[in-house]
Image (cartoon, rainbow, N blue to C red):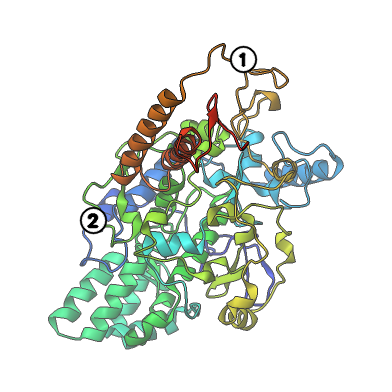
Amino acid sequence: MARTRGASFNSRGESSRGESLSQGEARRRPIVSARRSRAAPIQDDPIVEERAVEEQIYEAYETHGEENAFEAPNDDDDEEEHADVHDIEEDVGGFPGGPHDHSLLTHYVQHVAYAISKGRGLLLGFIERWHFETSSFHLPIGEMSITLDDVSTLLHLPVMGQMCDLEELEFEKARTTLVQLLGVDGGIAGAEMEDACGPKVRLNWLREIYVQRCESQHWDYAARAYLLHLVGCTIFANKSASSIRVSYLLLFRDVHACGRYAWGVAALAYLYEQLGDASLASTKQMAGYLTLFQSWIYEHFPGMGRRRLVTSYDDTTPRAMRWQSPRQSSTLAEIRSQLDALTYSGVVWHPYEGHRGIQPFFGICMYSGWIRIGDTLCRHLPERVLRQFGFQQDIPRSPTSVPNADVVAIDHVWLHFRAHVVSNVRHAASTSDCVDGYIQWFRRVSHPYIIVVADDARPAVAPRQRPDVPQEARPHRRSSPPSPSGALARFRRMARMLQSLISCRHVTEGTVAHQVSVDLLQIANEGIDEYSPTRRGQRHVRGRRSTSN
């Protein structure tokens, strides 16, 4: 199991700050021949099929190598980092671009965004805005995150059930596990792990085992090989993109009971872990299910990336299958500039309303607390991203108020999740609604911008109402008001056009364009009511309803 520095806790509730890879396990870019050998899937997958996830990982590594390569830290770097920490403690003004208050992002000095400000290198657009302290992306408009609801909708994976237990296996125990659960010879199992450089197996070897077990009609062995391969190239993809630890095979010991696990929770905890690891300046690669990550961006940020919509998408399938990655991706400079200029109008807060008939919202998605995969623990904090659930965003509690716990206690809390869901929330008056002072608080404790410019040069997150007109200016009065009958006809025509636009689905539900169309239709209907001469027998004067007798 990968370990990040500060991004997770072990089963004793202690901070895990080891290296993300075990000693001796080199960071290697998958070679072209290995990628080609992994090109074809075994069969159609029951969850979202990994469409070129390995190519995506490889391309991400290429991008890192060209634009954001980091030198391996040496002793001088360590001394410089300690000096930086000392400087931070003395500097009450905070960091350029934030945070100015260090109480929330306590490990910011280790974050890639800090390294960027120091000129040490760059990572990819969204990753550099991820902060493991809050399990969220820090953006100019506030925090956003990949939640259990996103996983449930994008992948159609279950988010209710047991959390997945994992046991780290030594070489000999891993060999025994392969013999017992895949029916392979002990010598063959040992040779494979030696080729894979540890207690793990290669994905192409699993494909061969699957074919062999199908030919011999050993269906349980075949099922386990298939399932291990499936999770190895999707929700538990590692940095090599070519192997998976034997530990995960234990999850399929009883192939008839796999449905008891909350696979969506495991996928999200694993992705959180990998995002936390990738956000550190010393990390060059990222693991995890990139299809989940990318489709989340496509759904919530319609202006980001050169994505392509799959025209043959079937609404009964996982939502992530709507999207196809383009052959030419956006550059890091483009994404960084777009995110720094992000406003409320560039975000779709809850894009899945049209999909709820297929995949409903589950109350457990509002659970606030620890989630885990094995003994790797991550915080799931929906109270920090309430606008993604249609609620007004308030200033959230400190993430450290979630008490540390061991695996047994976490599982107990999870099974009694109803006592730990976010409550006392208010429905949002608008999709981006937040309490007064939230953005000011957020910018004080966070680092929402990467490009360092003057604060007054940044766009407002919410568009100002008629910024060219002074606030104290009186509106110009018409010398001759329009005819009520003419205004009524225009309002009716506007309402018909907008209703047709919405009913025929010319605007996608959940997008900003759809919300604006609905708001305009409401305004048009109000205009019809106001100008209609038959409205409850009321007479009109200059287009305004009179209540006099």
SS class of the residue under badge 1? Answer: loop
Mark 1: few, some, or many residues within 10 Å (few <14, many ≥20)? Answer: few
Residue 100, how many percent across, how many down?
A: 77, 40
Determine the residue positioned at 74% across, 52% down.
104
Picture quadrant where residue 202 is located = bottom left
- Say what amino acid the circle numbered 2 marks: Ala
**In the image, residue 475 lies at what x, y percent?**
64, 18
Q: Which residue is mark 1?
A: 476
* Residue 153 seen by the camera: yes
In the rendering, at what x and y percent does residue 345 appear? 52, 37
Q: Is 111 on the left or on the right of 49, as rendered?
A: right
- Above or below: residue 165 compared with residue 75: below
Residue density around tag 2, few if under 14, some if 14–19, many if 20 or more, within 10 Å: some
**In-front residue for pair 327/508:** 508
Q: Residue furthest left?
A: 215
Separation of marks 1 and 2 at Cα, in angstroms: 66 Å
Residue occupied by mark 2:
39
Q: Nearer the viewer, mark 1 or mark 2?
A: 1
Q: Residue at left 78%, top 46%?
A: 85
